[in-house]
Image (cartoon, helix red, strand yellow):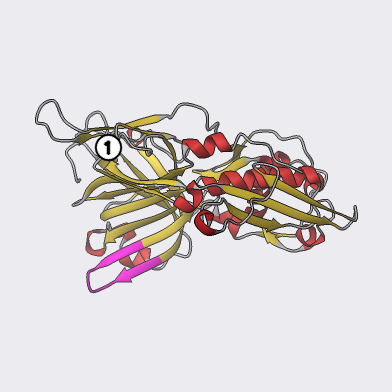
Amino acid sequence: MPSSTVRGAVQISTDTNAAPVTVGGWVSWEVDNNTHHSPDTFEVVFAANALPDAYDAAWMTSQKVMYVSLWGGTPSDPTNWALNELTQWIYGQVDTVEFDPEVATITLKGRDLTRVFQDAKTTEKWQNKTSSQIATLLAKRHGLTPVVTATSTQVGKFYQIDHDKMTNARTEWDILCELARFERYTVYVQGTSLYFQPIPDSSAPPSQILNWFPRSPVNGFPIADYKSIKFTRALTVSKGIVVVVRSLHDKMKRSFTAIYPGNSIPKQGVGSQAGSEPQVYYFNVPNKTQQQCVQLAQAKYQELVQHEMKCDIALPAAGNDGITKNSSIGIRGTGTAFDQTYYPDTLKRSLDIEGGYCLTIGAKNMSPDAQDASNGQASS
């Protein structure tokens, strides 16, 4: 193990109903927890000559289906620990098996159970069901536990007469993601559960605070709650964003336009003012009502401004099991505009018998100025 206190485990099964078996011989694993409607991915590397006889290289490379669980953490007694003292960071299905005879390694790569929705296409319409009813139905269809917050609007109200979207075959995951956008929800798979829930309240205090102390009272050197951190700010976003959504509604024989924030499209600057005007983003979507255009403009604005302030953080994974894709991270102490709250885009945990137990985070948010601007109203 990379540390006297860190422990990890790899479990494999060949059927979702079969009991997983803890398999030794691994030398490293990595889990990439993604947000924004993307599957979590994993990679685990085994030393082929260290595999147990029952799960040797011949067995590993001949399997058609494999499911993997990756565990890591710091048990209270590292010399006498149980699996339930660790955190399961992913449960997923193997997509590829790689064998390198030169260095004698076998690498398993795969996705979490988001894949069952990504690999299934459907032409079902569900006009008379709500988004939460559809999410529950699809979860149970694949043997997953639905963790779903109820919604009230039937999906036929969303689509109106959008014939293409109601008849063309699409993946079930595309449908879930689209319904989540309509509802301002988040959707993801964790373990054997499908989560379909409201987006966390951005006004809530951060769930995790990371501090920077410019000068230690002991030795005068800067100290921090992390190994390293880097910030970037997109100035094209900082100067402001306006979203314009336009829609031609076939059935109503009308066109609709929504502008957010504000009530007019900014004029192009000239001379010394050129380049200082807000960036305008146009979206043309068919068969939306005025209210739907307003809602879409607000949602697109929130998506775009969250790319303004970004940070990349590296810190020890040990002791930071509480940081997940649903966390909010407050940065304090830099004395700059980057002291604010961020929301993870990606969290990558890696456990290596030589390199240690590490966590890297990519996170983003809008600046406080943009948050103030977002309180404006959408015009119709």
Q: Main secondary structure of the magenta part?
A: strand
Please say if 187 is above or below 219.
Answer: below
Which residue, as the protein is rendered here, is positioned at the far bottom?
A: 102
Residue 63 visible somewhere in the drawing: yes
- Left or right: where does residue 128 sit relative to residue 304? right
Please say if 156 is above or below 368.
Answer: below
Q: Position of residue 20 (x, y in %)?
A: 42, 47
- Left or right: where does residue 380 sit relative to residue 342? right
The amino acid type found where label 1 is placed reads Ala
Specify start and end residues of the magenta stretch as a single range: 97-107
Residue designated by label 1: 318
Magenta run includes residue 276: no
- Left or right: where does residue 344 sit relative to residue 265? left
Q: Position of residue 366 (x, y in %)?
A: 49, 41
Residue toward you, 238 or 195: 238
Q: Position of residue 11 (x, y in %)?
A: 37, 49
Q: Quadrant of residue 334?
A: top left
For the point 9% across and 31% down, which residue is it?
Answer: 219
Residue toward you, 365 or 7: 365
Residue toward you, 372 or 271: 271
- The quadrant the N terminus occupies is top left
Residue 144 visible somewhere in the drawing: no
Mark 1 surroundings: few (<14), some (14-19) or many (≥20) residues within 10 A? some
